[in-house]
Amino acid sequence: MINIADDFTQFPGGRYKRNGKGSGEEFREKFLVPHLKAQERIVIDLDGVSGYPPSFLEEAFGGLIRQGYSEATLKQFLSFKAGPVFDSYIQMIWGYISKEARQVH
Amino acid sequence: MLDQLLSATTLISSAIGALLATLAAEFIKSLVRRTQLAETQRDIDLADILNCIIDINATAEKYWLKSAAELGADRYVMEAQIRAKLHHTAKLIAGLFSAPLKYECDTAHHKLMDAVSGGNFGEPDREPMPERLTHVSVTAMDLRHIVSTQRRKLKRGVLA
């Protein structure tokens, strides 16, 4: 289980590392890719942060498709946990993954 | 003696009746007040959402009209305001609506989020993007319309 607020940052930032701390790129590289390489299932807890900019979510999760992971693989290994406020971000994340998968293929 | 007993019983019965009637009336009044308060709170939340959307739109107009360099340190304030208000709107929507009404609001909210804080939002070398403003305004108006529509669909208490 990865809790973004506890394990990464309470203040998710922008898209790239050059934008500062807590970027989507940094989260993807530090937390998602190592688990996916090891073929481990990951549960990501979205609660507790100050909100997610779309650029963070798109880069962290849509960026996995650009790195060569298929949508099917991500559906197999990624799952999300969120309360009522944050559950709408789950819909956004899968939307970014699907959109990027359509563009890549 | 019997007459006195009967009068006393009648007196006590009518007193109990009056007490019960008063209690019932007060109970109904409190139910009505509670339901009206809940409806008022819903209207306050709706107004808060609508105001947030107006603020987000206004800040986004200033933000996307200039480059990151032109905005200087103000861009951090604007980015923080946009993020905070988008998140606050998400919280209010989650508090006001539940499925299936919430789903449509969430979808419209995501479109506004993408329009306002997607793309190269937050990037230090971002150029002005005035062409984005129409999309921002359209998604903001869509969300305002959808939230207001869904509010009307919320079931009102019978006593409201």
Image (cartoon, coloured by chain):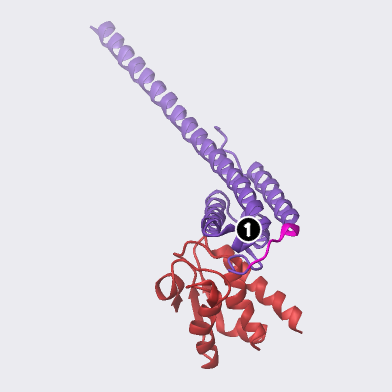
Chain colours: A red, B purple
Q: Is B23 displayed left or right of B134 in the figure?
A: left
Foreground of the two, A47 or B117? B117
Q: Is B99 displayed left or right of B19 in the figure?
A: right
The residue located at (49%, 31%) in the rendering is B32
Residue B146's x, y, as percent? 69, 49
Q: Is residue B137 above or below residue B152?
A: below
Secondary structure, mark 1, is helix
Residue A38's x, y, as percent? 51, 93
Provide the chain ID for the residue under circle 1. B
Quadrant containing the C terminus of chain B in the rendered view: top right
Residue A27's x, y, as percent? 51, 78
Q: State the count of labels.
A: 1
Residue B78's x, y, as percent? 55, 55
Q: Magenta includes B15? A: no
Look at mark 1 in the image and give the residue it sits on.
B106
The residue located at (63%, 58%) in the rendering is B106
Asked where in the image residue B124 lies, by quadrant, the reply is bottom right
Quadrant containing the N terminus of chain B in the rendered view: top left
The residue located at (53%, 77%) in the rendering is A17
Question: In this view, which residue lies farthest toward the left?
Answer: B1
Foreground of the two, A55 or B37? A55
Asked where in the image residue B129 lies, by quadrant, the reply is bottom right
The residue located at (41%, 25%) in the rendering is B26
The part of the chain drawn in magenta is B126-132
Q: Is residue B157 above or below residue A60?
A: above
Question: In this view, which residue lies farthest toward the bottom?
Answer: A38
Foreground of the two, B78 or A58? B78
Q: Residues within 10 Å of mark 1 (few under 14, many from 20)?
A: many
The amino acid beneath tag 1 is: Asp
Q: Is residue A80 above or below residue B30?
A: below
